[in-house]
Structures are given as structure tokens and as C-alpha cells.
Amino acid sequence: MSLTIHTKDLVKTYKSRTVVDHVSVNVQQGEIVGLLGPNGAGKTTSFYMVVGLIKPDAGTVYLNEEDITKLPMYKRAQMGIGYLPQEASVFRKLSVEDNLLAVLQMTKLSKKEQRQKMESLLDEFNLHHVRKNNGDSLSGGERRRTEIARALAVDPKFILLDEPFAGVDPIAVEDIQGVVAKLKYKNIGILITDHNVNETLSICDRAYLLIEGKIFKHGTAEELARDEQVKRLYLGTNFELKRKDWILEMGRSSRPLEGIKSLDDMSKEEDEQEQLN
């Protein structure tokens, strides 16, 4: 049975100011949904209410028909709702493989199965070359891939991504988009909130635009990009949507991610080459 996260009339008020005003969104397994809006529009607060970081003053968060509004984050995680914060969440002094094992050891898998799962994740996310590297030595793209691989260790049904394109260089953004596309074709539902509207809309199936705490517009990426009011209030009159369907098709492939090299990765290779010379 396919699962859906949906909210009904979420409300949040701070000091008599309503920052989220009856917001209703839904995310199904196997789709990428964006939660967009200018600064102060309420998108981050709405996102955090779905995650469980903030409790709504009114309204409900559901997983299918089950009310999960009052459940803490760890309970939501047990129900298959994963969350990746904007801030680095890797264990900085642990290697990549130990980051994965730290999560796998909390599952019911045997030691052998844990190692097999770890190897599979290293393969899938093209992390073999950094498996012994500590978290604090990874590039932005490598760190994000490690974080997402670690989230997948517990087989989530949904992953909620907070600013996934922050802190990575422009080339590595496409690497992360490829990872997100792969999640979609694993039948994982993805909710993204990010200030980088171009990169978010380029891979979203649907998106919600919040203005002044309310859902102003909901539709496909193409529908939002064509809407004159959306352009005037948020995207800009000269905005042109540049879909990255080739990345989505790459995500459909069962092959491991090849990993687009980031500027950080290339700098590392240059340094290593200089040392050899």
C-alpha cells in the first residue's frame, strides 16, 4: 500500500503574528514535492511542523489516516519518515563507513547483513573512494551523499530534505539532484524546501508556493513557472524553467551513481597529483 504524508490546516502564530495560516500539503511515495516561498513566507515553519521540530497551534499532520501531529521525531522515523537537516549531520570524527554502521547497528540486521548493506550503500552512492575518510574531510557533495546513504540505511518511506543544495558548489548540485532522483525511483517520497528555486523546480513533480503564510499556488513545476502572478511575486518576470529530465532519467537507472565531481573533489585530485610530482 502506498503511503501519503498530508497536513490539514496547519497554523502557527508567534507573538500575535500568524506565520503559517491553514497550510495543507501532501506528499506521496515516489514523488518529489517542493515547498517554496520568499523569506518570511512560512515555508520553513511549515516544513518543520511536518518534520516534527515545531508543534502547530492548530491543524493536523497525517501519515495516511494516522494522526502523527504530537509524535516526536524519533517515533516518526520509526514509521518511515526520514529527515536531513541543512546543517552537516555526519559524525565528523567517524569515517564514512562508520557513519553508516552507526545507524545500521540500530537495526535488526545481523552483523553480516549490516556489512552487506553498508557495502551496497557505498556502491550505490559512489562512496567507496572515501569510505575510510572522516566526515570532516569530505567535500560538500560527498557529505550530502553520505548523509542520504545513512538515511537509507533504515529503509525510509519518505525523506524530508532541508536546503539540500546549500553548502555545495554548483557542479555538485547536479550530483545531489541525481541522488534525489534515485530516491524517487526507489518509491521514496521527497519533500524539499530550499531557497534555490531554480534547482528545486528543475526536478520537482509538484510544488507549493507560500506567500505571507498561505498556500498561494500549487501545481507542477511547469504550471508555476508559467503563472504570471507567481512570476511577479516570487520567480521574477524573466524566470525560465530549465527542467533536468535527464537527471531524473539517470535516477531511473538501477546502476550506481557515477558521482559528478565537485570543485572540491577536483581540487583534492590536483593536490594529490602535485604531491606525487
Image (cartoon, rainbow, N blue to C red):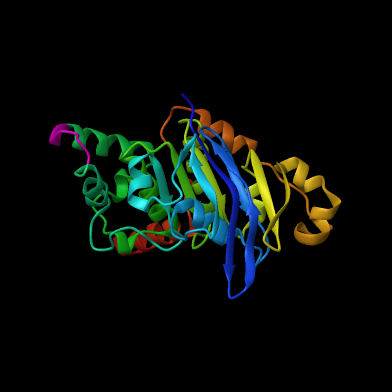
In the image, taking residue 109 as reference, residue 89 lies left or right, namely: right
Relative depth, front residue between 8 and 26: 8
Q: If the image is split into quadrants, where does the C terminus sit?
A: bottom left
Residue 181: image x %, image y %? Answer: 53, 38
> Where 13 falls versus 243 (above or below)?
below
Q: Quadrant of residue 157?
A: top left
Residue 115: image x %, image y %? Answer: 19, 37
Q: Is residue 109 highlighted in magenta?
A: yes
Q: Specify whether residue 162 is in view.
A: no
Relative depth, front residue between 11 and 207: 11
User: What residue is at 58 percent from the left and 76 percent from the top?
Assistant: 15
In the image, taking residue 24 as reference, residue 124 lies left or right, namely: left
In the image, taking residue 146 as reference, residue 31 lies left or right, namely: right
User: What residue is at 43 percent from the left and 29 percent from the top?
Assistant: 255
**Numbered-mark total:** 0
Relative depth, front residue between 121 and 137: 121
User: What residue is at 42 percent from the left and 50 percent from the top?
Assistant: 83
> Where 50 falls versus 110 (above or below)?
below
In the image, taking residue 73 as reference, residue 215 lies left or right, namely: right
Magenta region, main secondary structure: loop
The region drawn magenta spans: 107-112
Q: Is residue 128 highlighted in magenta?
A: no
User: What residue is at 26 percent from the left and 52 percent from the top?
Assistant: 99
Extreme residue in the left direction: 111
Residue 158: image x %, image y %? Answer: 45, 40
